[in-house]
Amino acid sequence: AKWRTATVPYRVAWQPDFEPYVVVRRDCPRYDQRFVGFGWNKVSHIMELDAQEYELLVLPNAFMIHMPHAPSFDISKFRLSAGYRGCLQTLREEFHQDLSRRYGAAALKYLTAERSL
């Protein structure tokens, strides 16, 4: 609702499972290659950007349209395979540990948020 009436850019804070579309410079952190297919590629990327203190700004008078499309093959695997979901959970835990090693106590908010979901 705020975006509809905004006239100047405004900052938003990271949230669990946050997957905004972003525009960043080429030299920003890359997507974590552990997350391919369906599950956590955009979430982990935004967490990394937030951990590096990138500002997340909403631009008024700018938007994009997400075109409807058929479900991906990988989302079907995620929904139907406990093994797939288990592997994704293991990768998420490894990612959290890596963030903790790189960013110390600042990365605790991601783990705390994950556990409260």
Image (cartoon, rainbow, N blue to C red):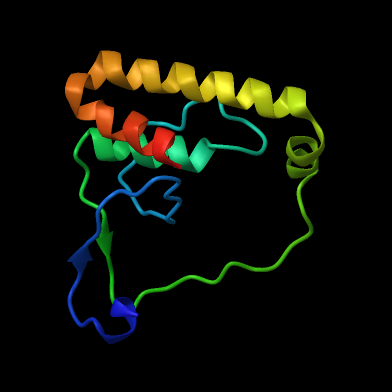
* Residue found 20% across the figure and 50% down from its top: 55
Q: Quadrant of the N terminus?
A: bottom left
Q: Would you identify the image quadrant in which residue 116 lies?
A: top left
Q: Would you identify the image quadrant in which residue 47 lies?
A: top left
* Residue found 70% across the figure and 67% down from its top: 68
Q: Is residue 28 above or below residue 9?
A: above
Q: Is residue 28 visible?
A: no
| Left or right: 66 as drawn, with respect to 27 | right
Residue 109 % position (x, y) = 27, 34
Residue 23 % position (x, y) = 36, 54
* Residue found 54% across the figure and 71% down from its top: 65
Q: Is residue 23 above or below residue 58?
A: above
Residue 27 % position (x, y) = 30, 35
| Left or right: 33 as drawn, with respect to 75 | left
Q: Is residue 6 above or below residue 22?
A: below
Residue 69 % position (x, y) = 74, 62
Q: Is residue 53 above or below residue 100?
A: below
* Residue found 20% across the figure and 19% down from its top: 104
| Left or right: 81 as drawn, with respect to 25 | right
